[in-house]
Image (cartoon, rainbow, N blue to C red):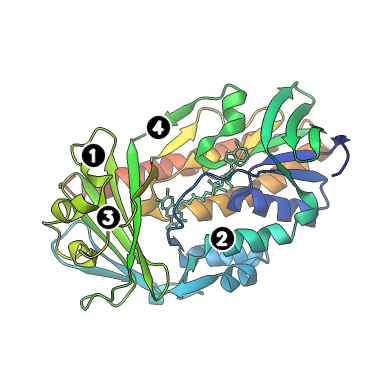
Amino acid sequence: MNKTNFNTDVIIVGCGVSGLILSNLLKEKKVDHVVLDRVEKRKTLEIPETLPPSTLVLLESLNLLELFLKSSSKTFGYHSLWNSEILTTDSFFNHNPYKYGLKLNKKVLLNDLGELVTDHILPFNNLIEVLRSDKNVTVKVESDNGVKTINGRVIVDATGRNRAILKLLGVTTESFDNQIALSCYLPYFKHPQLIHRVFVETFENGWGIVSALNDEVNGMTLYTQKGSPILPQLKEYQNWKEVLSNTKILKDFLTDDLNPKVVGGNANSSRVSEITGSNWLAIGDAAIAFDPLSSHGNSNAIYCANLASNAIESRLTNVASASFQNYDDTLSQIFNEYLKQKTKLYDTDNRW
Ligand SMILES: Cc1cc2nc3c(=O)[nH]c(=O)nc-3n(C[C@H](O)[C@H](O)[C@H](O)COP(=O)(O)OP(=O)(O)OC[C@H]3O[C@@H](n4cnc5c(N)ncnc54)[C@H](O)[C@@H]3O)c2cc1C
């Protein structure tokens, strides 16, 4: 990794869940690879993200369950006021074999995943260029140790919704809505009507979720569409009380004493026009990005990394293998099915 010019089989760009799990799986398969980790991180708010019980089975099969459990807390269900005036509770108790989901501590999780593949991670400051032919990919980056040139056989975009490599390859993004998320931290409050520490409610032009980060902090995120009349109001916490005034429960989590910073970001459903090419593929959010309401994002990142590791292994041993096309087809099918479910779900609430 100290060399200024080197060859490898796979170049992964992006150190999120998808990129780091792919690296772990390729390491297990003894596939030569490097993970390019951009040193400068975008400032985002660490919000509590939930992993459903079904994903724990996949993690177990990948020998990653223990690692995830170490950095997460268990969650046993959630409440919602989505398509009815009556509070509904979804308990994970009926799920098998795991009767709980996980609330991820992303910072600790990414650190733990990264530690297992430190010898594969190359930090860089600036991506200078990506040159691709049907046989090879060359990536030039600027690092603290000077310019590095990496020649690979396959490149993987794991840069999330940023889709940094796909943009350079001229691959376009198709968006299916314009959802925006605005999040802030609030002091932890145990609502007397709720057992579980995750709650979702819709309101006019939007919906919101409150989820405990720990015993001291609740993360609250409000969602609306770009161009919605409430978007300018949601950018300032002082207006949240007014926007949530007609909610039954969500408004109870707000506090008058503080004025927390609101951090915004895209949370729309989108996919790329092509998920794979002759020697590149996209994984996680870079390939297909879900509405956070689905809690599918991290599960998809893990699932994609697993499928991609097998597709890459096949392709490296047999250039004529259809593994990339099969990977593309599988993800396209998943996304089409998701869009159908999403439409059904949003149709059940007529408040937004
Ligand atoms: C508000 C909100 C709430 C969510 N809640 C949930 C939830 O409860 N449950 C759930 O499962 N999912 C949730 N998600 C989705 C989940 O966060 C993502 O699906 C998941 O993080 C995707 O992982 P990834 O590795 O594909 O991408 P990311 O986690 O986005 O990782 C991409 C990595 O690439 C890096 N990168 C970006 N650009 C470059 C570049 N140019 N060069 C190099 N590196 C780059 C980034 O720094 C980052 O490290 C939520 C998302 C949002 C927005």
| Residue 256 percent coordinates (x, y) | 20, 63
First of labels 4, 3 by sequence position: 4
Q: Position of residue 59 (x, y in %)?
A: 60, 64
Q: Cα distance, mark 2 to mark 4?
A: 28 Å
What is the C-alpha distance between the residues marked 4 and 3? 21 Å
Q: Is residue 32 above or below residue 129?
A: below
For the residues marked 1 and 3, what is the alpha-carbon distance in whole angstroms?
16 Å
Q: Secondary structure at mark 1?
A: helix
Residue 232 — which label? 1
Q: Nearer the viewer, residue 47 or 316?
A: 47
Q: Which mark is residue 107?
A: 2
Residue for point 80% across, 40% down: 145
Residue that carries the numbered disc 3 in the rendered image: 208
* Mark 1 or mark 4, whichever is nearer to me: 1
Write the residue at 73% across / 23% down. 132
- Tell me the element at label 2: helix
Callout 2–callout 4 Cβ contact below 8 Å: no
Which numbered disc flags the more N-terminal residue, 1 or 3? 3
Residue designated by label 4: 175
Query: Residue 13 placed where, x, y %?
Result: 66, 40
Q: Residue visible at 27% across and 62% down? A: 258
